[in-house]
Image (tube, helix red, strand yellow):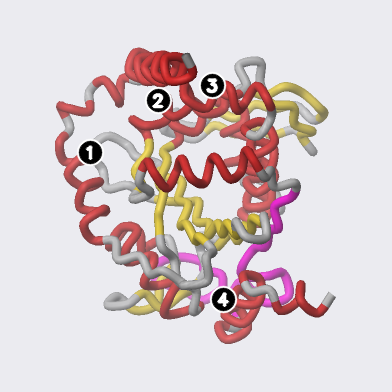
Amino acid sequence: MVFGYSSYEYLAGKNQASSKSPGVAQAEEAPSIEEEKEQYKEDFQGVDNLDDKINVLLLGSDQRGDERARTDTIMIAQYDPNNQKVKLASIMRDTYTDIPGYGYNKINAAFYFGGPELLRQTISENFGVEIEYYSIVDFEGFTATVDTIAPKGIEVDVEKDMNYQDGAGTIDIDLDEGAQMLDGEELLGYARFRHDAEGDFGRVERQQKVIKLMKDELLSFNGVLKAPRLVGTVQPYLDTNLGTGKVLQIGKDLILNPVETIDTMRIPTSDNVWNERKDYPIGLVLNHDESKTKEELQAFFEDEKEDEE
């Protein structure tokens, strides 16, 4: 009975994704994108940190047709099943970093140059944090995830009016201040908005807030029931080297031992960043004390502070 229900929901989600997304329906007509995804899996050389913790590189991709994908969202998620803890570190896209083989550039350029593997190497060599897995979801996949787990929307306290349209017509954000239910497209706009005095700093904070809200929805009773449909819905939009067995294992652990809070941080931290207004060919960057950034990120993912308490 349970297997039949799960199979039905999974197939329903997959069919729903294919019918709603022209990009998914046309996947066979764009083999270059699929080949690129397969290449990511072949190239990625994830490193097991040998401490029973699972580190995943989470990337948000703005895939446009056959163009090489870009990523404006870079996060390292750590799941510690032994202590039932989840940590999430956001790396700001303009962080000035030494990319192996390419020299100093904005860190999101690593993904453009060499996909998740080069980004993994960049993080390892600059910050000393090893990553085992990667997961890339495009914006359509994000909206589909939200609309599947919360068909009536997710309640968000929008802290200010947010209005922005880009010249290409691909971004249309129109949100009013106040508590309200946001559907997938609206929540994506909320998470992407950066056209105010806070810029990317505010956007990263909102992205972490959205992750926490989605975690609560996923681990609710209704969210658990929708899990099979969610897997089918998101699969066409998701590129990951996390095998089905590992995903099911993590999902089972989280359902049986729910994580109440997610610890978050952003790098560079507020006291370790400055905008150096030099005429870089790559534009304005976020300069930082690299050794301090490394220390802060490593300390965040270690348990030294927790053991002292």
Question: Mark 4 falls on what kind of element?
Answer: strand
Q: Which mark is residue 232?
A: 2
Sort mark 3 into few (<14), some (14-19) or many (20+) by Cα contacts within 10 Å: many
Would residue 77 be counted in the magenta stretch? Answer: no
Sort mark 1 into few (<14), some (14-19) or many (20+) by Cα contacts within 10 Å: few
Where in the figure is residue 225, as x and y percent of width and height? 58, 22
Would residue 262 be counted in the magenta stretch? Answer: yes
Q: Earlier in the sequence, mark 2 or mark 3?
A: 3
Are the two marked residues, 4 and 1, in contact with CB atoms closer than 8 angstroms? no
Three-letter code, disc 1: Asp
Q: Which mark is residue 287?
A: 4
In this rendering, the label closer to the viewer, 4 or 3:
3
Q: Which mark is residue 66?
A: 1
In this rendering, the label closer to the viewer, 1 or 2:
2
Q: Earlier in the sequence, mark 2 or mark 4?
A: 2
In this rendering, the label closer to the viewer, 2 or 4:
2
Question: Mark 3 falls on what kind of element?
Answer: helix
Q: Measured along the vertical axis of the image, is residue 217 above or below residue 251?
A: above
Using the numbered discs, state the Cα–Cα distance from disc 2 to disc 3 in whole angstroms. 10 Å
Using the numbered discs, state the Cα–Cα distance from disc 1 to disc 2 in whole angstroms. 24 Å
Could you tell whether 303 is left or right of 64 in the image? right
Disc 3: which residue: 148
Using the numbered discs, state the Cα–Cα distance from disc 4 to disc 1 in whole angstroms. 32 Å
Q: Measured along the vertical axis of the image, is residue 102 above or below residue 85?
A: below
Sort mark 4 into few (<14), some (14-19) or many (20+) by Cα contacts within 10 Å: some
* Magenta highlight range: 261-288
